[in-house]
Image (cartoon, rainbow, N blue to C red):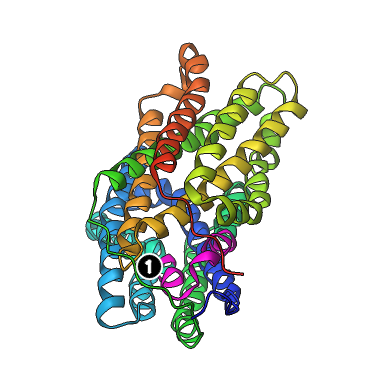
């Protein structure tokens, strides 16, 4: 195809559809976290074990994300279609999730059955993380990927924004109802992935000579994973450990359900501009600059002298993390090009899961409740976003310049 041939329009509808699936996955996870202590008590296990179970879940995610990504790569090379993989795993995942609040009432067998269903649900849920992005990366024109990633990440932004409201709305509800509704809605939405893939497969795509397949987990990939881990741990610390305490300096606890989601407003607003910046300047430079912006906003939030300034800092921090995440997804697709997208995306999700484990470990160690450590904890996201920005920036300096978009 000549360089003057018009590029086919990006499959925005597919990206929006996957965003809906991501939103439902995030809300399903939120419901699980909300009700986990009650489920453990119903199964005859201590509610205090909930955080340890969440650590175990994230460990399972780390392994399953990489495995599902590699499997998606293999499926697309051999069978050509990964939609059935996503739907099949989701059927098992939703069935396990649907049964969870029921088996905890079965008496002596409840603990074993509940643990088994949790493991099945967590493992199969990984089909909703890396493989959908592999699907987009397989069929979409490469220059359109940052924009498509930004559309898809809107689902994560919306899911994060509604999480505090779910916590209030579902506090006194029988868990069987939200578990049933969320699992059935997720299954219904995911069932259409097969049709989405068929539609994508019928679209014309740009012809480009495939680059040589990168080595698995080479030095550049390992450095990129370190950068992602630093950036994700900074986000976990800033949003999950520091934000509420910072708001409580100026607002009552009842206001947190309205104030905390403002981070996700900034995140959502930054999605489309972040995708455009990635397309123009490359994913790695955008990641590095956004990381430094995140470090500055975290510093501003820690030293805000009024609620208005704190809200502004949180909005900027959310926007910076939004740009970082769009750029990270886009760089993963670029890192894994030529049939390794699933591996790159799987390792990315594994780093996000590891960052979550670090945050839960900090909670288990009592760090957020230690007043003596509060000043130091406020500096953690500043340092980690700064360090992650430096790591990614060094990779950007050593990377070849991005190819210009076709006219």
The kind of secondary structure element at disc 1 is helix
- Residue 232 position within the rendered picture, expressed as x and y whole percent measured from the top left: 44, 40
Q: Quadrant of residue 46?
A: top left
Between 87 and 120, the residue placed more toward the observer is 87
- The overriding secondary structure of the stretch rendered in magenta is helix
Displayed quadrant of residue 121: bottom left
Q: Relative to 204, is 320 above or below?
A: above
To which residue does mark 1 refer? Answer: 131
Q: Nearer the viewer, residue 166 or 102?
A: 166
Residue drawn 64% across and 18% down?
Answer: 303
Q: Nearer the viewer, residue 104 or 158?
A: 158
Q: Where is residue 5 shown, x and y percent of the image?
A: 57, 80
Magenta-span inclusion, residue 85: no
- Crowding at dot 1, Cα within 10 Å, few <14 / some 14-19 / many 20+, comes out as many
Q: Where are the magenta residues, as a range? A: 133-152
Res. 172 in view: no
Quarter of the rendering occupied by the C terminus: bottom right
Label count reads 1
Residue 6 vs 272, above or below: the answer is below
């Amino acid at each position: 195809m000549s360089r003057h041939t018009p590029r086919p329009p990006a499959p925005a509808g597919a990206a929006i559809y996957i965003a809906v699936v991501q939103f439902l996955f995030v809300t399903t996870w939120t419901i699980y976290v909300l009700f986990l202590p009650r489920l453990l008590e119903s199964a005859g296990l201590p509610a205090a074990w909930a955080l340890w179970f969440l650590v175990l879940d994230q460990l399972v995610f780390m392994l399953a994300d990489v495995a599902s990504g590699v499997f998606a790569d293999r499926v697309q090379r051999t069978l050509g279609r990964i939609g059935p993989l996503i739907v099949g795993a989701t059927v098992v995942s939703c069935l396990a999730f649907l049964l969870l609040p029921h088996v905890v009432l079965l008496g002596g067998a409840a603990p074993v059955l509940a643990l088994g269903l949790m493991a099945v649900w967590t493992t199969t849920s990984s089909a909703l993380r890396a493989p959908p992005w592999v699907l987009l990366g397989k069929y979409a024109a490469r220059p359109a990927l940052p924009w498509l990633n930004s559309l898809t990440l809107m689902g994560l932004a919306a899911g994060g924004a509604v999480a505090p409201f779910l916590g209030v709305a579902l506090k006194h509800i029988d868990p069987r109802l939200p578990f049933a509704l969320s699992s059935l809605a997720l299954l219904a939405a995911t069932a259409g992935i097969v049709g989405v893939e068929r539609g994508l497969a019928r679209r014309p795509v740009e012809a480009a000579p495939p680059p040589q397949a990168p080595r698995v987990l080479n030095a550049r990939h390992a450095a990129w994973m370190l950068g992602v881990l630093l950036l994700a741990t900074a986000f976990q610390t800033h949003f999950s450990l520091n934000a509420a305490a910072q708001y409580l300096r100026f607002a009552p606890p009842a206001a947190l359900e309205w104030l905390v989601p403002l981070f996700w407003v900034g995140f959502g607003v930054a999605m489309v501009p972040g995708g455009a910046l990635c397309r123009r300047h490359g994913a790695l430079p955008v990641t590095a600059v956004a990381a430094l912006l995140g470090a500055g906003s975290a510093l501003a939030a820690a030293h805000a002298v009024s609620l208005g300034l704190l809200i502004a800092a949180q909005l900027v921090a959310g926007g910076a993390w939004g740009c970082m995440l769009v750029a990270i997804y886009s760089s993963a697709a670029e890192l894994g090009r030529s049939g390794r997208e699933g591996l790159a995306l799987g390792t990315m999700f594994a780093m996000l899961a590891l960052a979550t484990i670090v945050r839960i470990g900090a909670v288990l160690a009592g760090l957020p409740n230690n007043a003596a450590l509060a000043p130091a904890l406020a500096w953690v996201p500043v340092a980690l976003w700064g360090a992650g920005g430096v790591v990614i920036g060094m990779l950007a300096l050593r990377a070849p310049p991005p190819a210009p978009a076709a006219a």
